[in-house]
Amino acid sequence: MIGSNEVQAEDIILPSDKRIIAISAIGSNMGQEFTEYLLDNEYQVIGFGGKNSEQFTNKIKARYPQDLLDFFYCDYFNTESIAGAIKSARLKYPKLDGFIHLVGGSLFNKPVSKLKTEEFTKVLNLNLTSAYTFSKYIFDWLQNSDGGHMVFFGSTTGIKPSGYKLPYAVAKAGVHMLVKALAKEGADFNILVNGIVPGYVMTARHIEELELKAEKNSSSIQSEIDLVKQKNPLRGELNTEDMFPVLALLLTTNVITGQNVTVDLGQTDL
Ligand SMILES: NC(=O)c1ccc[n+]([C@@H]2O[C@H](COP(=O)([O-])OP(=O)(O)OC[C@H]3O[C@@H](n4cnc5c(N)ncnc54)[C@H](OP(=O)(O)O)[C@@H]3O)[C@@H](O)[C@H]2O)c1
């Protein structure tokens, strides 16, 4: 049943030898691939999210041993809903090792003169307020677990604005600073906080967009992909799996904190 996070005493999961990672928006394009990567690499995953994330979790659950993957429903725009989902998860999993925040999206693509204030606020709430709210409650969970790792997803749009995505640029720049401010506080509790800042990732959503572009331009999907590649110095394509090693590093490092790692084939800086 969607929205049911009820936990009974017999549900409590005792500490295992696997590291337990919580993921917000587990059903996002990147979240799906990160989850399978972690489950295939000796991690246990607790997903948080909306309807799409719940459907994804249910779909893949049967492929993994029982208790390796769990899910708690929440509404990203509602503080109590996020707090409640994390509270339910903590009752079942007293110890947490890490957290990945993936909630986000640009939502509106229009010039500032056409942008409504409520649209600006919605993008800020989806990207930045959700990151703050998750971080507040996850921080406490990690503090009570003797420390851990937090990884937030920013965007190169938060470093160098891309056309007509003003609210998203502002929100992601905020996420980048949230990483630094949290890392400073986390240092006293062995909580290491970092960000991954991707450029254009070839997720299923972006492939669909390029297919539409190809149709509109009477070109081919390959020529649209080639145009994307020409925008970065390495002339390459960025896929979710290219970020696996960065994610693994930031979930295990004892020496890196407060960093936003740009993963964009050199596009923003070079
Ligand atoms: N793809 C890229 O090229 C790219 C580049 C730079 C940064 N990023 C960032 O990396 C993260 C993951 O990217 P992605 O492409 O995998 O994301 P995605 O597939 O677009 O999914 C993001 C998730 O955020 C939630 N969400 C998005 N719009 C929403 C709305 N209007 N209302 C409620 N929830 C909404 C959904 O969660 P539920 O599924 O739980 O409903 C969705 O699955 C995001 O923070 C994104 O901003 C992506």
Image: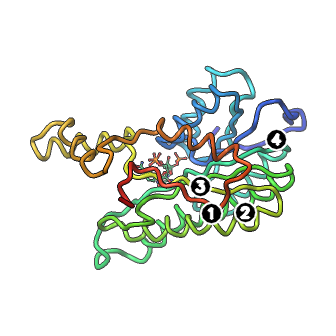
User: From the viewer's perspective, is residue 172 above or below residue 261?
Assistant: below
* Residue 234 in picture, x, y percent from top left: 33, 45
**Quarter-wise, where is residue 206 in the image?**
top left
Distance from the alpha carbon under mark 3 to that under mark 4: 21 Å
Residue 111 relative to residue 142: left or right: left
Distance from the alpha carbon under mark 1 to that under mark 4: 25 Å
Q: Nearer the viewer, mark 2 or mark 1?
A: 1
Badge 2 marks a residue whose secondary structure is helix
Q: Which label sits on residue 179?
A: 1
Identity, as a three-letter code, of the amino acid under mark 4: Tyr
**Residue plotted at (22% across, 41% down):** 226
Instruction: Locate the C terminus and report the quarter of the image it occupies.
Output: bottom left
Mark 3 or mark 1: name the one nearer the start of the chain.
Answer: 3
Residue corresponding to mark 4: 93
Badge 4 marks a residue whose secondary structure is loop
**Residue plotted at (39% across, 42% down):** 238
Residue corresponding to mark 2: 136
Mark 3 or mark 4: name the one nearer the start of the chain.
Answer: 4
Q: Residues within 10 Å of mark 2 (few under 14, many from 20)?
A: few
Residue 198 relative to residue 187: left or right: left
**Residue plotted at (44% across, 74% down):** 118
Identity, as a three-letter code, of the amino acid under mark 1: Val
Q: Is mark 2 within 8 Å of ligand 1?
A: no
Q: Residues within 10 Å of mark 4 (few under 14, many from 20)?
A: some
**Quarter-wise, where is residue 156 in the image?**
bottom left
